[in-house]
């Protein structure tokens, strides 16, 4: 028979094993990807593709659901993620430079050390759009309109993101002065433009791709033309050296067990070996671009330094 001391030792051992046992069964309930923007934007579109393949490549039978937590340019969502239990069941979307810009230009309760970085999956270029029947159909048209003194309204997800930085470069290059309308996501900016509530919008290619019949594309902000919009010239082709994109990746709350973090990273690596995943990304006009955890975190840190310098030299609010 076990004496009391031996019973206590056995119980202590079982308690110590409980986290390992839980990890071994991971996942055994639904996983939530928290998206900091509304439905229909590039981050949301990407997350919904990723969710299907996390279900496929994470061990277990759990579903992966996408939860849109719109507000403060993604700050509310990342606040929730940083405060979630570090058990692997809450995943956050993290975009650069947008998620960084909103850490710098306002007070938030988290920083880069609040997260375990997983992988990034895309670098989605920006494009400048108007309505399909608008008089402004080229960058030269826009430049002339601005020279005539017209002050145009421009929709974007929010201040401190790549769409905002792109708009500032456009103002400088074309001599424009926009009235900015932050709308909480590029899907919302696209919708506002199509509804005639704003004159222009900066959105990601993935957010505009399925609406080409209702939109006019003034240019893509990438080194070369988008494979999804071969007829749309780049800004560089039109004489304006502007490139901008959103690099989207994923994070877990800091302190998530190492075995679970590794399980996620293995799942992301397997996705990019899956031709169906690549086809699904392409179908949504999301350029698949993989960075593993180390490379993803290094890019975030590099972008953080660059955005801090931008804010120091030219604060945008």
Image (cartoon, rainbow, N blue to C red):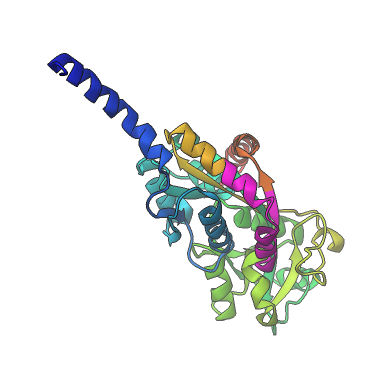
Q: What is the x, y in percent for residue 145?
A: 73, 73
Q: Which residue is situated farthest in the bottom direction here?
A: 133
Closer-to-camera residue (105/39): 39
Q: Which residue is situated farthest in the left direction here?
A: 4
Quarter of the image with the N terminus is: top left
Q: Is residue 290 above or below residue 157?
A: above
Q: Is residue 305 magenta?
A: no
Q: What is the x, y in percent for residue 314?
A: 61, 43
Closer-to-camera residue (77/127): 77
Q: Is residue 147 above or below residue 34?
A: below
Q: Residue at x 78, y 73 (%)?
A: 138
Q: What is the x, y in percent for residue 94?
A: 53, 48
Closer-to-camera residue (158/209): 209
Residue range (magenta)? 266-289
Left or right: 306, with 16 as reference point: right
Instruction: Please say whether residue 237 is visible from this viewpoint.
Output: yes
Please identify the quarter of the rendering in which residue 302 is found: top right
Please identify the quarter of the rendering in which residue 179 is found: bottom right
């Amino acid at each position: 028979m076990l004496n009391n001391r031996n019973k206590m030792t056995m119980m202590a051992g079982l308690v110590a094993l409980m986290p390992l046992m839980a990890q071994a069964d991971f996942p055994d309930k639904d996983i939530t990807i928290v998206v900091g923007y509304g439905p229909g934007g590039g981050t949301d579109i990407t997350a919904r593709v990723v969710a299907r393949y996390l279900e496929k490549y994470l061990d277990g039978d759990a579903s992966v659901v996408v939860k849109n937590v719109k507000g403060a340019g993604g700050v509310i969502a990342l606040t929730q993620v940083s405060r979630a239990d570090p058990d692997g069941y809450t995943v956050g979307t993290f975009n650069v430079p947008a998620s960084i810009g909103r850490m710098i230009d306002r007070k938030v309760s988290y920083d880069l050390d609040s997260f375990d970085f997983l992988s990034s999956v895309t670098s989605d270029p920006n494009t400048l759009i108007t309505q399909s029947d608008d008089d402004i159909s080229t960058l030269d048209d826009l430049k002339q309109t601005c020279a005539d003194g017209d002050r145009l309204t421009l929709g974007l997800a929010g201040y401190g993101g790549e769409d905002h930085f792109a708009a500032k470069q456009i103002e400088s290059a074309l001599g424009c002065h926009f009235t900015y309308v932050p709308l909480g996501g590029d899907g919302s900016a696209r919708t506002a433009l199509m509804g005639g509530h704003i004159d222009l919008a900066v959105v990601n290619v993935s957010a505009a791709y399925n609406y080409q019949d209702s939109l006019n594309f003034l240019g893509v902000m990438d080194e070369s033309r988008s494979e999804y919009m071969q007829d749309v010239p780049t800004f560089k082709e039109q004489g304006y050296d502007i490139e901008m994109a959103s690099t989207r990746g994923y994070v877990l709350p800091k302190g998530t067990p190492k075995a679970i973090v590794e399980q996620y990273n293995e799942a992301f690596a397997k996705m990019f070996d899956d031709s169906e995943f690549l086809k699904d990304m392409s179908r949504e006009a999301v350029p698949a671009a993989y960075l593993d955890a180390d490379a993803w975190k290094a890019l975030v840190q590099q972008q953080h330094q660059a955005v801090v310098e931008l804010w120091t030299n030219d604060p945008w609010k």
